Image (cartoon, helix red, strand yellow):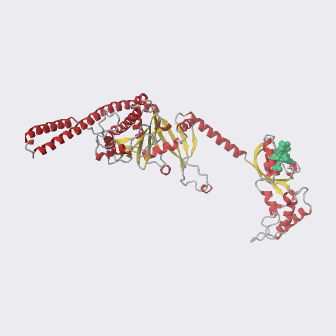
Amino acid sequence: MLTDYPTDHVAGANMPGKQASADNYDDAIDAISRFLAEPPEGTPAEIIKAFELFGHQPFLPPGLFLETVEQAPVAISITDTSAHILYVNKAFESLTGYSREDVIGQNESVLSSQSTPLEVYEDLWRTIQQREVWRGTLVNHRKNGEEYLAELTIAPVLRDENQISYFLGMHRDITEVHALHQRLAFQRSLTEAALNAAPMVVAMIDANRQVLLDNHAYKALLTDCGNEEPANLFLEAVAQQLGFDLDSVCHDGEGFTNIDVRLDVDGGNSTRWFTCSGVPIPDLDDAARSYFQSGKKGSCGLLLIANEVTESRRRLNEARLNMIRANMAEQQMVGTMRESILASIFKMQAPMNIIRAAMSMSDTGSNGANMMPVLRQALETGEEAIDSLHAALPGTCLEESSPLNMNEMVQDVLRLATDRFLAGGIVVDWRAAPVLPSLNGRPNALRGILKYLIDNAIKALSESGRNYREIRIETREEGGNIVIAIMDNGPGMSVSAALKAFEPFYCGWENSREHAGMGLTMAQEVAINHGGGVEVDPDFIGGCRLFVRLPCNNTEESERGIA
Ligand code: FAD
């Protein structure tokens, strides 16, 4: 039997640089000779060949292979092609509880606990009979009946002409590893159950912003955001407010608390408000080289918690909207008065200029001398009228600048115009950037521009006589500017009209009543005072598109003054 072979005498013999004792060497040679003279029944020919080879190998100790296999810490067995056991090592004996005498000649199925599904065995046999290595997990039992999970590798040993001669099996007990995985999975389920019960949005992200763990509220928000990861939207919004960056948060170990975040989801049709907090969590570093560097600070993850406060915001917003409504009505009244008075002043300049010209001609002619008093009186009366009109011109109220979110501004104006959209049968397609940086500006003045441009779009559509009427509004950030694009599918503007549109008193409407032609001029002035501008898109086909561009970092705005 193989067990009789005295392997414990062989270690170190004949090793280069080591002087093995002559006694040890002789013992090993003697053992190999005895083994080869009477090999145990069923010992594979390859094993016998290997012993013969190593018996005559001048640099390695004889029997090294056998000794290595014998002492390997993994359970090793060699079987014939029907899985009848020919050899097992010591680790096999101690793992299974079966001695060599118990199992030699038995099928490996002696280890089966009869609870591994049949398909697993079928796959095992299909694989090894195709001369491939099979790796998998089986439920085994020890001699004492105790079950354990065996992680098993079976390699076919091939002879000449690719014939399978033996199978080499190696297995280890992974019951504890499996139990650990189960416990981890259980912990994860517990954590997820606790998170799912929480009404707030919770997500754990890694250093690459990949979501590792989330809850029901997060998943629901993900769907509402059109599958755009809400964690990224939150981080982007917080970054804009705090200059936040995940690396520095990891480095400093400090997160952020209760930051107000506005998300314009569903293309801006639904605005959601959250107060968002982030807690940095040291990341699990499973890279091999980090094994000896446990104290070193690596990357980290972030636990994001966002509490939805949309409802309370909505109530506040309603009250704010009422104030804006009143304010804009007043602003519009004042604007209309200013526009009309300026138009009157402008129109009065024409006859006055004629009078001035007539007076200069009358100076030289003899008949004209008689006309002079009349003309002078007409001029004086006209100038008095213009002075009165100037005096009646309503003043502009200076508004404080404050940080503004242009999505919110657009939305305010759209809400205020809802009745008019409905009355005009106009479909509004509002495509808001999910997150926009704030800009410094005068809210009423900017709302005034938007209202003016949207009013123009409504008017253009009503003049077009089209059945399908659409206004599309988009916001985006582009090169440090907030761009608001307002489009309508009305008649559009000709190239010459687009050039004149910003000139004072130009009016291109078919029905020009109530329009003094100062609106776009004033809108442009407000935009310029904010460091931006309004422009007509000359290439737009199928209607009219205007862009309002406003810089995000508009620090000089207050110095320019405002109309
Ligand atoms: P069986 O009816 O014997 O086999 C189940 C299915 O396996 C059969 O329906 C058939 O599809 C296939 N099958 C079985 N024998 C053969 C064959 N000779 N040729 C082709 N297909 C066949 N099993 C364990 O449970 N635990 C182990 O640790 C283990 N170690 C092994 C190590 C080696 C090196 C080898 C070659 C096999 C090992 N096996 C092990 C598999 C074992 O030999 C049995 O196939 C298995 O235990 C199922 O035995 P059974 O009596 O329950 O069912």
Q: Which of 405 and 342 is in front in this view?
A: 342
Quadrant holding the C terminus: top left
Residue 513 drawn at (x, y percent):
31, 32
Q: Which of 119 and 58 is in front in this view?
A: 119
Horizontal relation, residue 35 to residue 173: left or right: right
Query: For residue 178, what is the image quadrant?
Result: top right
Residue 281 drawn at (x, y percent):
53, 46
Residue 367 drawn at (x, y percent):
8, 41
Horizontal relation, residue 344 to residue 555: left or right: left
Residue 481 seen in the current view: yes
Q: Nearer the viewer, residue 486 or 275?
A: 486
Quadrant holding the N terminus: bottom right
Horizontal relation, residue 400 to residue 392: left or right: right
Q: Which of 394 and 20 is in front in this view?
A: 394
Vertical relation: 8 (above or below) 318: below
Taking the spot 71% from the left edge, 45% from the top edge, the residue there is 176
